[in-house]
Amino acid sequence: MSVTPRRARWLVPLLLVAVWLGVGGVLGPYAGRLGEVATNDQAAFLPRSAESTEVIAAQRAFRQDETLPAIVVWTRDRDTSLRDRRAAADRALAALSDAPGVAGRASPALLSEDGKAIEGVVPLRPGLGDELAPALGHIRATAERVPGTTVHLAGPAASQADLSDAFAGIDGLLLAVALVTVLVILLLVYRSVLLPLVIILGAVFALGLACAVVYVLADHDVVHVDGQVQGILSILVIGAATDYALLLTARFREELASRTDRFAAARAALRRSWGAIVASAATVALGLLALLLSDLTNNRALGPVGAIGIAAAVVSALTFLPAVLVVLGRAAYWPAKPRPAGPNTAGAGVWRRVADVVDQAPRTVWAVSLAALLACAAFAPTLTAKGVPLDETFVDDAPSVAAQRTLARHFPGGSGNPTVVIADADRAARVVATARKTAGVASAAPVGASGRPGGEPLVVDGRVRVDVTLSTAADSDAAKDTVARLRTALHAVPGAEALVGGYTAQQYDTLRTAERDRTLIVPVVLAIIFLILTVLLRSLLMPALLVATVALNFLATLGVSSLVFRHVLGFTGTDPSVPLYGFVFLVALGVDYNIFLMSRVREESLRHGVREGVLRGLVTTGGVITSAGVVLAATFAALGVIPLAFLAQIAFIVAFGVLLDTLVVRSLLVPALVRDIGRRAWWPGRLSRGGAPAGEDRAGRT
């Protein structure tokens, strides 16, 4: 009778392993299929309530749906005129009107004032997806029929095609780089053969589960996914799943070293670590869900998508991993042998020395750490989050960027990508005159029945469309300033009810919305984190202290990032969403490590008092938390393999910020502050069990 229960207790871990193997086999391929439901059409991610979004809807009344312009530019040698090639360019453009993916008639060929370039605009349907590259290929082949010229493709359509090419490696290359990086780090940390593979397998299973859920939701238009969200999801799941696994496996190793029963060791490890893991996951997931308050669709998409990824990571860490650890037992750590962790453990070396420094001079440690972070944070206001210029969108020079430079050398900056104005027909003349007088406007004309500027305006439901060409490049800061002036001027025209939209207006609205989102979402995320920490640590002062330190870490990271972006990487601007993404990731993930540390400090303080609890907590968690920080930093750094400025900026901010948090905030600043403040740090809660040992005063000193 005694054999049956012993055999029966193997059923749960073996069943869990079998279930997860099934999940991996069935859902694993979805990690490579998410691109099937992803869109890189930026028009799908505009602010919901912005004026430029209203213009898109208003254009449909003119049977002129939003199009994706492809700008064809013909050039010849510097000293040669193209006046004799204009007719051939006109014929090529006319032949493209019925080409696949084209949404109407192409514009006539326009000769530059210097006679050295010809321009034509071919309107494409937005949302072509995989059909965009063939459509542009056909346009190029047709344009090359003009003899003696070189063809360049610029405009939003060419940029979107280059963007799709950049994201082409996101399913394979990014995932491979991230997994190999994590595997190498784990092998170095654990010096074990099986355990790193088990942790990686759990992360891959979690990613497959998350991608399958997101795939279904995106396929039913519940969430929108683009390449950026797709890449961040992969990195987030791998990094989070690995972090949670490191915490659990470290605790299992401790328990296994002091117990002979692997089942009891697994239960104890799970019981003593699940609270910190769940609190950590809840912090990140709820912080991401706060992005639902954003008015930008891609921000709102990242919220639930990222939360799904975190949920999959924590489920894998708390079910698959314990089951495998039970099955493997001590063999999981082979050839190393599990040893009990503690302040006096051999090999605790560096963390014992760090703890001694914190113990002997806590006030000096936190003062120096605080001063260094404040010095870095002083540069945070210099970070420019007004958008990345087109020629910096790609880390490597893309064809569309080179074409845009060629276009700008010969034509007005906004040529081929006009600002669109919808206004009352009775005020059309006044609107056109006002637009022409606005500083930064090169030309303005109403659109006729042919769909082109000039001639008799097309009137639909008492409204007209006016195309405004700006003097500067459509993606420049100067162009955005012109849109702001244009709106101010046209809104003041009595009875015009003018709306200003188009590409530049969309960029301007995105920038303004991103600023509004930061103002709203940052306090919400901080409040969420504070509430979770209050429940976990049963204190008010400690959560306030932890939230303040991770917020300071974020500001210090922004300050360093501003210097690196400008003087090392050569970026003149930052994507408007980068500060918000950086804040959510760094603050939520930074609190993770403080949760891991302080939950252990509280546990040790209940038994040994605050002073000894801080030292024991720092020594016992130092190695595993530092390993987790290095893993997370490395996984986010893997985003740098995608040659886009946005992802490169996110990669640096999160990777550097996580390392700064792990090595300075969690290792020095927080322990020193708690050591200096003593038992009062846990106010208004009381460490009732154990309390302070005899001879320890209220500040935690002996």
Image (cartoon, grey):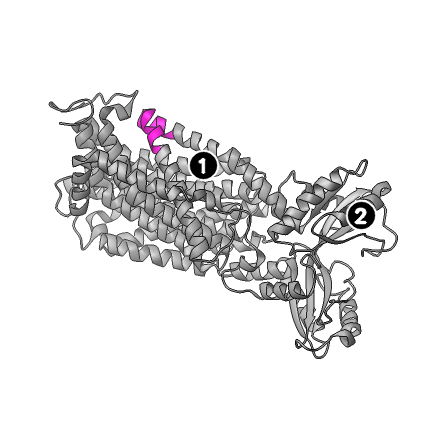
Q: Is residue 63 left or right of residue 599?
A: right
| Residue at x 65%, y 69% (from the top left corner) | 152
Residue 545 occupies quadrant: top left
Residue at 59 percent of width and 52 percent of height: 39
Quarter holding residue 136 = bottom right
Q: Amino acid at mark 1?
A: Gly
Q: Residue 287 shows which numbered tag?
A: 1
Q: Does label 2 or label 1 sit earlier along the sequence?
A: 1
Q: Residue at x 79, y 67 (%)?
A: 94
Element type where label 2 sits in the image: helix
Q: Quadrant of residue 58?
A: top right
The label nearer to you, 2 versus 1, is 2
Q: Is residue 274 positioned above or below 388 on the image?
A: above
Q: Position of residue 361 (x, y in %)?
A: 18, 36
Q: Quadrant of the C terminus?
A: top left
| Classed neighbour count for the residue bearing mark 1: other residues with Cα under 10 Å, few (<14), some (14–19), many (≥20) | many
Query: Which residue, given by chain and number where applicable, does mark 2 sit on?
Result: 432
Name the dominant secondary structure of the magenta segment. Answer: helix
Depicted 358 relative to depicted 20: above or below: above
Residues in magenta, as a range: 532-546
User: Residue 185, position in %: x, y?
Assistant: 29, 55
| Residue farthest toward the right in the current orientation of the protein | 456
